[in-house]
Amino acid sequence: MTDPYKVLGVSPSATDDEVKKAYRELAKKYHPDNYADNPLADLAQEKMKEINEAYDTITRARKSGGSAGGYSGGYSQGYGGSAYQSSGYQSSGTSYAQIRQAINSGNLQYAEQLLDACPARDAEWNFLMGSLYYRKGWLDDARSFFQRAVGMDPTNGEYRQALSMVSGANSPYRQTGYGPPAQGSCDMCDMCTTMMCMNMLCGGCR
Amino acid sequence: MFGYVRPCAEELKVKEFERFRACYCGLCHELGREYGIPGRSILNYDFVFLTMLLWGGRETCDYTFRRCLPGLFRRRCVCQRAQPLTVSAGYSVILAYWKARDNEDDSRGAKRLAARAVRLFLTRGYKKAAGKYPDFDKSVSSRLAELRELERDGERSLDRSADKFAALLASASDAAEESCRQPLKSLLYHVGRIIYIADAWADLESDLKDRRYNPVAARFSLTSPQAPEEIRESVRETLMGSVSLAVAAFNLLPVSYWTPVTENIVAVGIPKMINDVLAGTFKAAGRGIPKRPSNTGRTETLK
């Protein structure tokens, strides 16, 4: 078995807090949300399992060794698997269910064939086309289809969620700090000034 | 379309930047050793990135001291010969040759002669490299042929044309160790997509002027290089979405000697490049040994 400390990227002499921190960081990195509809989801899941096992091994060993372990559970339920299944079939025909399954299992060619053969071009069809393209990494086409799906059926939460996912609304890489700041956002300078003002206020209260 | 993938040097530790420079120099020396002066002339940042990714699970890198023409008066620390450097050098010659051939077919008049000169200049090296890496050679030539066909038909889907270049780059993952091939393939695919689309955006003006096919112009039916704000945002979303996917793939690669540098490239360097390209402030990398950023006249790095 591989060294659990190496898996977490900490030295064996690290304190319990350091181990916990490293574990949490990695668990965040491989969180199922980051691999939703991604062909690499299986690999991420494996990695998550490895991390969980390593963390369990370390905490168990430290507990039995008399050192304070304390933390248990937490992210261990992270990969329930549900994240990769779609939330129920809202559509009528059984072939949509088939297409969903094909997309989820990564059989994209088959899914494309089925979609091409579909007579209807309704919201669900557009959504599935979008999912198919998203899985391929074709984000521009995927967004067009998701937009069309949302336009046809604005009440559907699944479609809206897909659209916001592909639009990178919560992408952590938007602001690099070196490019021009996005309009209306608070840049580091604003933040710094705010901090300074807050600091002054805190000092004044004493 | 080279030179888009590079680290954000301000965010690298000094030693990490020195390592990056040593790898750049190492690739240059490898190109010189295997393919002579034509080889050296096609050195670019993108293949330095590939070299570092092909390092795999190796946890060390050996260095040596060497001189070269631009740095004649100083012996520089460069990466010693290693298999990833050799592979990367071969791949870059193959790609440069096919790109030159493509250019030759695309252009007319004096430009065509210039492109032909480049191709002839590279032919000898190409034959050697193609003999060594026939699979990559085949993949590059067929993908570029497919891309040409799409371009000739004026393909309107940005993703469909980007897919060809992305798949071409992704096929470079075959040189990696079995265990990291899948995430590497995915990473290179998304990076290739980003390069293709960013390059299309950067070439918008010249392509429209010369009435050449431009995937961004075709996708949004643009007729003038001043793209409306919503189109810019839409391209930004597409590219940043690919960055997220590239980072997700990168995180599944084993930690290697180069991880601090490659991580910077994927998560900081590329987003910065995208911002700069979309804002029209991107400057292509100059020739020569990468320089550490100096702070004169710039305040933003201090914030």
Image (spheres, rainbow, N blue to C red):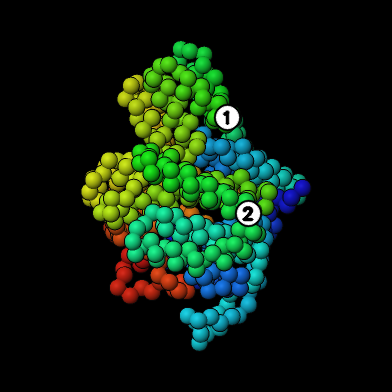
Question: Where is residue B35 shown, x and y percent of the image?
Answer: 58, 70
A201 shown above or below A91: below
Q: Residue at left 60%, top 41%?
A: A44
- Amino acid identity at mark 2: Pro
Q: Is residue B39 visible?
A: yes
**Dot 1 corresponds to which residue?**
A107
Q: Nearer the viewer, residue B189 or B161?
A: B161
Drawn side of residue A43 relative to residue B102, left or right: right
Instruction: Give how far across and how far down residue A37 sits, in percent.
Output: 51, 34
Q: Which element carries disc 1, helix, strand or loop?
A: loop
The chain under label 2 reads B
Q: Which mark is residue B134?
A: 2
Position of the C terminus of chain A, as image quadrant, is bottom left
Residue drawn at (39%, 54%) of the image = B106
Quick one: label 1, few (<14), some, or many (20+) residues within 10 Å? some
Q: Which mark is residue B286?
A: none
Question: Can residue B22 be seen from the camera position used here?
Answer: no
- Confirm whether circles 2 and 1 share one chain: no
Instruction: Identify the residue at image location x=57%, y=66%.
Output: B125
Type of residue at label 1? Asn
Chain label for disc 1: A
Crowd tier of the residue under label 2, counting other residues whose Cα lies within 10 Å: few below 14, some 14–19, many 20 or above? few
